[in-house]
Image: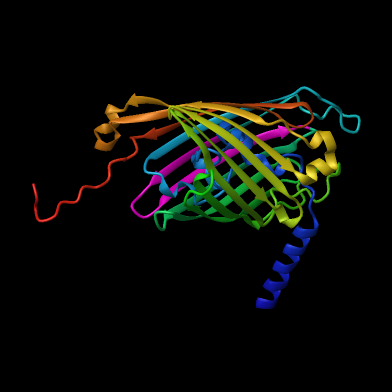
Amino acid sequence: MKKILLLAGTALLASTLFAYNPPFGGEEMFRLTNPELMSGAASATGGANFTVLPSSIVYNPALPAWEQRVEVDASGTIMFNSNKISILGEDSDSSAGFGAELGLMVPTKWFVFTGTTSFLASDFYGMNLRKSIVAHGGASKEISRNLAVGANAYFGYYMGSGADFTVGADVGVLYKGDDFACFKNPRYGFALLNLGKPLSGYETLGIDGSFDDASYPGFLTPRASFAATVFDVSKVKGGFSCDVAVPSFQNFIADFSFGVVIDKLINVSLSWQGNARELAEGGSDGFNVPALGVSMKFLFNSAKIKEKNSDWEQSEIIPSVAYQNLYSGIHAASFGARVNLGLKDTTPPEIIIWNEE
């Protein structure tokens, strides 16, 4: 029995490693449903300004470990096709697509539990991701002041002709280092993503122009990231992040983001993804323009919630928007909001010795 399982696992790994033909955008599909992910937070270190939201666990399950508040988020994306064409003589290229994401983060004494679900409909010739719904659930924990770990389980269903499902797990770590050179508050992240059953036989148009071997996102994807603050002047702080990922060990993706925080309330960010296989196979069609995003923090009185939890007297809402010109004339406009119940505890504990007054 062990030999049979070993052979089956080896066959699955071999077929996945040698069959690699994802559609354009297939390795970055989750960032398309949320404006903050689209504009820089899709990173194993939380992006340039350490933006952590429920859907962050898709890039590193350890990211929420230091969060102290219950958080709810919702977002949506509308995609427009300005270069609609016909495939094989048929009018099969869509004019529009959309995506949506819902998430929840709940800190407890032992773990921070996080869940996120995303839906995507993208029936474009230039980004043929088709229709899918994918749910992630994870737990993260602060191991020390500087180190956090986390793990996810996920399930996805991809609809339409050749319908298939994915199931698997992600693991990740996040480390906060000491300042060096011009880098302040540096963060190091590493994650192993998509450890499980990939898509097989799903009929979608891959980067090589065929419908063969279109499994995505890439099975067994290592992702490493570095982020830091590079300037902090008056009420303006700026940082950057850089991620590298190697999907199925057959591609190389680099994610860069730069962000500025103004008075701890306004966040402006830019991000760009360079996908080696998309650029090699698609040329100019495999190139996307950097995404631009803006978010703003507002405080509100949550007195009704306070009746159940005294720490929730005041809460905050963070609306955000983002825009990106994607592949082959496909434009994406994303909008959403996060609600954090309560405020962060910034007061250290007071220790009284010998009943001193």
Is residue 121 inside the magenta stretch?
Answer: yes
Q: Nearer the viewer, residue 223 or 14?
A: 223
Q: Quadrant of residue 118?
A: top right
Q: Residue furthest top?
A: 82
The image shows residue 236 at horizontal and vertical percentages of 48, 29
Residue 200 located left or right of residue 234: right
Residue at image point 27% right, 45% down? 348
Q: Is residue 309 visible?
A: no
Is residue 172 inside the magenta stretch?
Answer: no
The main secondary structure of the magenta stretch is strand
Q: Is residue 221 visible?
A: yes
Relative to 66, residue 11 above or below: below
Relative to 193, residue 73 above or below: above
Residue 179 located left or right of residue 18: left
Residue at image point 72% right, 37% down? 130
Q: How is the image coloured?
A: rainbow
> If the image is split into quadrants, where does the N terminus sit?
bottom right
Q: Residue furthest right?
A: 89
Q: Nearer the viewer, residue 127 or 352?
A: 352
The image shows residue 175 at horizontal and vertical percentages of 49, 54
Q: Nearer the viewer, residue 138 or 3?
A: 138
Residue at image point 38% right, 40% down? 70
The image shows residue 178 at horizontal and vertical percentages of 47, 51
What span is colored magenta in the figure?
101-124
Residue 338 located left or right of residue 301: right
